[in-house]
Image (cartoon, rainbow, N blue to C red):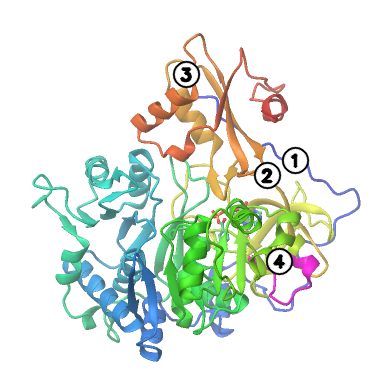
Amino acid sequence: MRKGHATTPSIRTTSPPPPAGRPGTVDVSGFEDPRVAAATYRAAGLWTGRTLGNLLRDSASQHPNRTAVVAGGRRWTYAELDRRVDAIAAGTRSRGLDRGERVVVQLPSGGEFLPVLFGLARAGVVPVLALPAHRRTELTAVARAAQAVALVVPGVHARFDHRPLARAVQQDVPSVRTVVVAGDLAGPEDDGRDGWCTLSDLEIGGRPAAHVTGPGGPGPEPSDTALVLLSGGTTGTPKLIARTHDDYAWNAVASADAAGLDATSTYLAALPVAHNFTLVSPGTVGAVAVGATVVVAPSPDPATVFGLVARHGVTHTAAVPSLLATWLDERLAPTGPVEDLSSLRVVQVGGARLDDTTAAGVQGLLGARLQQVFGMAEGLNCYTALDDPDDLVTTTQGRPLSEWDEIRVVDDAGHGVPDGAPGHLLTRGPATIRDYLAAPAGTDGFTADGFYRTGDLVRRLPSGHLVVVGRAKELVNRSGEKISPAEVEGHLLAHPGITAAAVVAVPDPERGERTVAVLVGGAGVPDRRTIAVFFAERGVAAYKVPDAVVRRERLPLTAIGKIDRAAVLADVGSG
Ligand code: OOB
């Protein structure tokens, strides 16, 4: 396989670079040792020792009768959610799943996701969040990398039956001994199938929860892994991100503060619930932490979202730029009823670069304050402040959540660049991981002193706000969804009609970027539709099918014989 390489723009300073990093307001000496950093985050009161289970428990005892979750026409109070989570935690344990064991969760936006997430976390069992679009190839890779002992899947979702998929993954990955279906079992062939049960069985089978949550009981420690996220653009060998209760709880609570989310707020989860943005920035976990109401949208389209905003008095929501554009278009030229959005206070936008013009339209068209969010599953979250001047809100991607988030902007040689100059963003901080739980060999994601190499190119303003100006990592950001060109190329090369393939990100007015595959082969080079069928047969998620396919006699190569991606892009960049 002809493997891709990053099209890293060269960034060099001409004058002697200033020292790396910015003189901080806090003392981070010794933080290259993660134990020193952890002890300081604790002493400084960032890591409070609360688990995700505690966040919910505390909100349930303070506001038992407040609505916690609204989904699919049903609602649960905090007391009800807490009981449900207890039952799932207990059922999980009584099924023999142990603290620290991993469970791949593949649930769509709906009423089950939060109970399952918190239920597993309360039991100390670790949810690994897969996407509903993942198929056998991805799920198997994730389950294998995580050495998962169980899967949680929906029954049928979006016309796809996840039960045969779960069976296939169970066949591929022998460590998977349990499958929980949030829905019905498929029928006689699954009834009594070893290790299979429904989510209701799990809840009913749960014993009183005290034994998993009581003081000194075998519940999770705050320093334990609370959940595992997949790194954006996860390839055939996924990069697993283990986030602890301590760091995730801090991320959620501090983000709620940054977004002005409190117990009187209503957060609409419009983006898919398993995305880190929807989970913790401040997302649903932040909402639960402060006792706000979470409304789960079954779909992010403007009609659904605006209807839910009007019906439930939504105050906060979050979108990726391409989704925001559809919301703004609907307000500009309504195609359906014009809903009352006056409850909306904050619309967060992130996941991909928001253009300044669209940003400027938010307040006028939605009547809400825009908050830009630049985040990553690996940890760092940046926000524009609600009271930042308008020009900073519309043209920057915000400042790190806390003074403890260390930022370095460096040139190709790793030297710091002056404020205002573009460079590679490196970061270390209270939410940011120090290493992947599992990653493909050769992954060079961190510096020796523990900074995460984000792969993003930014400029830092003297105010500390970051402007994302590009990307050095090889990734396509398609509506905030990250796709690895190398992975797609690997699948393409498995097709007998293709002898060489290059996948590049091409600017797209709607999605930000789209994938174009340049293919070499004889007469047998498949078209896009054939590739879609081929990918489905291989068990590859549909969003990885290239958006366009172009045939060429050969691929342009660099002097040392690698695919010249810049030349490929110059060739197909406008098509
Ligand atoms: C979020 O998380 P991931 O892990 O799917 O992707 C992270 C990457 C970043 O490294 C950056 O390349 C890109 O997505 N990104 C942005 C951005 N926000 C994320 N690029 C430009 N402008 C932005 N505002 O995407 C994520 C996680 C938590 C909160 C928000 C987004």
Q: Which residue is mark 2?
A: 472
Nearest to viewer (mark 1 / mark 4)? 4
Q: Is residue 563 left or right of residue 231?
A: right
Residue 167, image x, y percentages: 22, 44
The segment highlighted magenta reads 382-393
Q: Are marks 3 and 2 in contact (CB under 8 Å)?
A: no
Q: Which residue is mark 3?
A: 526
| Crowding at mark 2 (Cα within 10 Å: few <14, some 14-19, many 20+) | some
> What is the C-alpha distance between the residues marked 1 and 3?
32 Å
The question of residue 197 being in magenta is answered with: no
Nearest to viewer (mark 3 / mark 2)? 3
User: Which image quarter has ligand 1?
Assistant: bottom right
Q: Which residue is mark 4?
A: 364
- Which amino acid is tagged 4? Gly
The mark nearer the N terminus, 1 or 2, is 1
Q: Which residue is at a point 19% across and 65% down the rendered structure image? A: 200
Residue 228, image x, y percentages: 42, 59
Mark 2 beta carbon near ligand 1 (under 8 Å): no
Q: Which residue is mark 1?
A: 9
Q: Are marks 1 and 2 in contact (CB under 8 Å)?
A: yes
Q: Is residue 71 left or right of residue 25?
A: left
Q: Are marks 1 and 3 in contact (CB under 8 Å)?
A: no
Instruction: Please determine whether, in this image, residue 284 is positioned above or below residue 480.
Output: below
